[in-house]
Amino acid sequence: SYVLTQPPSVSVAPGQTATITCGGDNIANKSVHWYQQKPGQAPVLVVYDDTDRPSGIPERFSGSNSGNPATLTISRVEAGDEADYYCQVWRSGTDHYVFGTGTKVTVL
Amino acid sequence: EVQLVQSGAEVKKAGESLKISCKGSGYNFNMYWIAWVRQMPGKGLECMGIIYPGDSDITYSPSFRGQVTFSADKSISTVSLHWNSLKASDTAMYFCARRDLAVDDAFDIWGPGTWVTVSS
């Protein structure tokens, strides 16, 4: 089965930059989406198609996928960015979505 | 407002059947795929599969094929997730989410989730 590997946790001080990685076989040839999930809430889409942001998502959230791994970068981190983050791809062939293992971002 | 509203929390016993639902509003419900996503306690997200309400086309993720059933009633803009015989391991939060071509088939709208507790 296809696995997307993320670091379990990332810690960052306010105002600094957090980088979350998402590794998977041949991921550079896939479209990667990223979701933010705060405790007790449904996930929210923050980046789609590797680099695009939905309306309403701050420019501080950016993505890239030029190799393995894909990355989500949160610039000028704020306390409100503390959450779990998941990457996601569509696995063609078996036709199903795969989520990454998830990364807990802690703002120090 | 575009939204997905899910049915309320359920407490069931192992072996019982269950159907939970997800109702869309504020958009043409029949023209967007809906995904079901499981989140077990303290764990990550797992996509169970997707259903197209317009014609009830369904794709189950390999891990969930044969374990659950999806259905749609487009007349009331609702999709459902059904278990014939629950197990304790089905205890989880279940989200529905809209798949949108405008965001490269990512999930742009999520329901609040339905918590299912199954006791053995």
Image (spheres, helix red, strand yellow):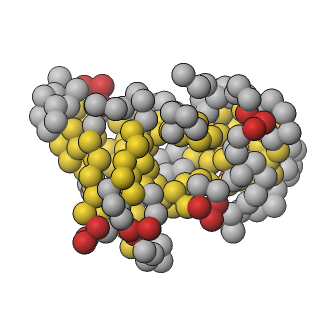
**Side (left or right) of A106 relative to A41:** right
Q: Is residue A46 above or below residue B54?
A: above
Q: Quadrant of the C terminus of chain B?
A: top left
Residue at 32 percent of width and 56 percent of height: B56
Residue B22 rendering spot, x and y as whole percentages: 32, 58
Q: Is residue A73 visible?
A: no
B45 or A17, which lies in front? B45
Residue B31 rendering spot, x and y as whole percentages: 44, 68
- Res A101 quadrant in image: top right
Q: Is residue A57 above or below residue B59?
A: below
**Side (left or right) of B107 relative to A23:** left
Residue A64 rendering spot, x and y as whole percentages: 82, 44
Residue at 73 percent of width and 60 percent of height: A53
- Report the label total: 0
Residue at 55 percent of width and 34 percent of height: A93
Q: Is residue B37 visible?
A: yes
Residue B81 rendering spot, x and y as whole percentages: 28, 47
**Side (left or right) of B8 relative to A90:** left
Residue at 81 percent of width and 41 percent of height: A65
- Res A17 quadrant in image: top right
